[in-house]
Amino acid sequence: MKQLQLKQLFLLAFLGLLIGLAPVTNANSADLSEPQIAIENASNKLKEKLQDETFTQDFSKINLFVEDVIEPHMDFGRISALVLGKLWRKASKEEKVSFKKEFKTLLIRTYSRAFIDFKEWSVRFLPLKIEKDTKKIIVKTEILQPGVQPLAVNYRMLLTKGKWKVYDIMIEGVSLVTNYRTSIKTEYKKTGSLQAVIERLSARNVVALAAKNNS
């Protein structure tokens, strides 16, 4: 799958947390499981903001709002560790903190871009059964677009301190974690150090945020 296509698909996956969700069985929120409700609550808050055109024109405000809404529902620490893989175990405490910060910024930027660019999509939940004492699940959804086949988007979630949090997103079987891990691994081979990878990521974040704020 081409890199550009992957980026577009992941934007659509992020959209699943930005727009209103409806379960496939036409049930209401009372029929959803706790993990599904976590995703739905974030979606509803963000959907309300889509109605405010003045808000959607201010990228810095969008970034702050998106971060505030989705942070309680995403395990950025686990995502960062999974993306780095073996490099996480070798990284210093300072490198782990820095990478998590910059990678979180990257993901927030991606959500925010989807928040601006996509408004006509809808998402539905597929049935979910949670066994007793289960701490890891996959919440299956479909992104619906007029005249196009539904796109399968699944959220890997982990029960952490009593809250269900997303730690990976899969689009048609392609994992966000695996995709970024491949990119980071390639960067690491080019630069030879994790610190250099972090610095490059930080520089790209600064440039991207400045470009959006000035557009």
Image: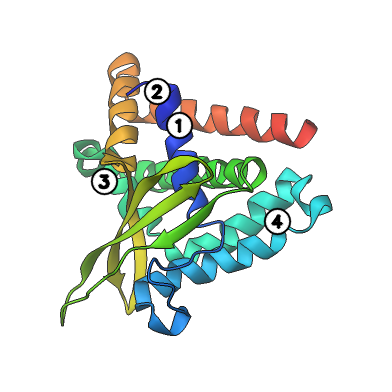
On the image, the x and y values in percent for residue 101 come to 48, 47
Q: Between label 1 and label 3, give the one nearer the viewer.
A: 1
Residue receiving disc 4: 50
Tags 2 and 1 touching, CB below 8 Å: yes
Q: Secondary structure at mark 3?
A: helix
Residue bearing the label numbered 1: 7
Q: Position of residue 207 (x, y in %)?
A: 64, 27
Where residue 70 appears, x then y in whole percent? 51, 61
Q: Disc 1 residue type? A: Lys
Which quarter of the rendered picture does the N terminus lie within?
top left
Q: What residue appears at the point 54 percent right and 44 percent down from the top-left corner? A: 146
Q: Is residue 193 left or right of residue 69?
A: left
Q: Amino acid at mark 4?
A: Leu
Q: Residues within 10 Å of mark 4 (few under 14, many from 20)?
A: some
**What x and y, as percent, mark residue 61?**
73, 52
In the image, 105: left or right of 103? Answer: right
Estimate the spatial distance between the alpha carbons at disc 1 and disc 4, rounded to whole Å. Answer: 22 Å
Q: Is residue 145 left or right of residue 119?
A: left
- For disc 2, the marked residue is 3
Gap in angstroms between the C-alphas marked 1 and 3: 19 Å
Q: Which residue is mark 3?
A: 82
Q: CA distance from mark 2 to mark 4?
A: 28 Å
Nearer the N terminus, badge 3 or badge 2? 2
**In the image, what residue occupies the spot 48% across and 30% down?**
201
